[in-house]
Image: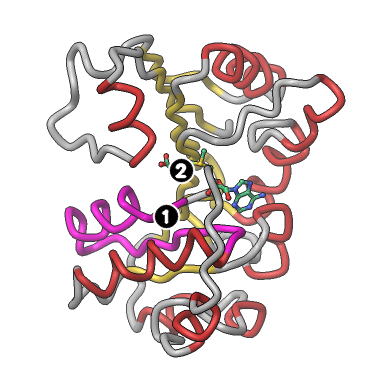
């Protein structure tokens, strides 16, 4: 993701604490109170400009969604998307590092993790940064309900193969694999920004659903 300097982003984010939660560590274990309901909670780690998580929140009003993104300059676009889509009471954003998820969620807080077009980190010495590395799978497990699923989409064949191996070695059940999602595009597929960009170039989109057993 190309980062643009947006000096106004921080103030804009701070002006919308109802969407970009300022102190998420205080809500750990109480997300149902924040959302004022007991709907399932699905999170997307690395949500970028938020097209997916906003679209999912619109499509599924009885599921709560949180988009998690590291950078001000990127999450500010997700915030603009979320504001444009209001009212959307089932969507929040967190400007935090996915490696710190355990600070904000406890076991059973989360029902599903989405990973979309995660940074591939192709160098072996950076493998631990891949969001499907065993340490991340362990981290997700520590905040998810038992037998939860990770849904992962990518254009990157190398990262996809790595992720299938990593999930399988972790003991997860590989449920549903697509090597070209758009050939028989599921009706409810919400495209991410990267998915639109890569599929427009004719590149196949890989997808897997993997379940903790
Ligand atoms: N999911 C979006 C999509 O499909 O269009 C964005 C994909 S972009 C390649 C990856 C995004 O993940 C970037 O916005 C990046 O800042 C974010 N990201 C990478 N590592 C992260 C981490 N550890 N925690 C939170 N966000 C992260």
Seen at 66% across and 78% down, the residue is 25
Q: Nearer the viewer, residue 32 or 8?
A: 8
The residue at 20%/63% (across/down) is 61
Spatial CA distance of label 1 from label 2 is 7 Å
Q: Residue furthest right?
A: 125
Name, please, the residue furthest toward the left: 187
* Residue that numbered label 1 is attached to: 42
Q: How is the image coloured?
A: secondary structure
Q: Secondary structure at mark 2?
A: strand
Horizontally, is 27 left or right of 183 in the view? Answer: right
130 part of magenta stretch: no
Q: Residue 146: give its label.
A: none
Q: Position of residue 104 (x, y in %)?
A: 64, 70
Residue occupying image coordinates x 55% and y 36%: 118
Asked if the residue under mark 2 is in contact with the one under mark 1, i.e. CB atoms within 8 Å, the reply is yes
Residue at image coords 64%, 60%: 107
The x and y percentages for residue 5 are: 56, 63
Quadrant of the rendered image containing residue 64: bottom left
Q: Magenta includes 52?
A: yes
Specify start and end residues of the magenta stretch as a single range: 48-71
Q: Residue furthest bottom?
A: 15
Which residue in the structure is indicated by mark 2? 114
Comparing 183 with 213, the one in front is 183
| Lower sequence index among marks 1 and 2 | 1
Q: Using residue 82 as the reference point, say whether residue 135 is left or right of it.
A: right
Q: Hey, which quadrant is residue 120 in on the image?
A: top right
């Amino acid at each position: 993701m190309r980062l643009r300097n947006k000096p106004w982003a921080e103030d804009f984010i701070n002006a919308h604490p109802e969407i970009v939660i300022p102190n998420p560590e205080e809500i750990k274990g109480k997300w149902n109170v924040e959302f004022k309901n007991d709907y399932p909670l699905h999170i997307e780690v690395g949500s970028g400009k938020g097209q997916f998580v906003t679209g999912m929140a619109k499509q599924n009003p009885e599921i709560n969604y949180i988009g998690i993104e590291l950078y001000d300059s990127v999450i500010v676009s997700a915030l603009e998307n979320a504001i444009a889509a209001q009212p959307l009471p089932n969507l929040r954003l967190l400007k935090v590092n996915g490696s710190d998820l355990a600070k904000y969620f406890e076991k059973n807080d989360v029902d599903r993790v989405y990973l979309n077009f995660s940074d591939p980190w192709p160098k072996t010495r950076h493998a631990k940064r891949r969001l499907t590395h065993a340490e991340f799978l362990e981290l997700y497990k520590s905040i998810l309900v038992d037998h939860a699923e990770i849904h992962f989409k990518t254009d990157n064949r190398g990262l996809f193969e790595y992720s299938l191996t990593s999930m399988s070695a972790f003991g997860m059940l590989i449920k549903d694999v697509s090597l070209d999602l758009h050939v028989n595009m599921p009706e409810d597929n919400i495209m991410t920004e990267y998915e639109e960009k890569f599929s427009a170039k004719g590149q196949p989109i890989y997808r897997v659903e993997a379940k903790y057993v």
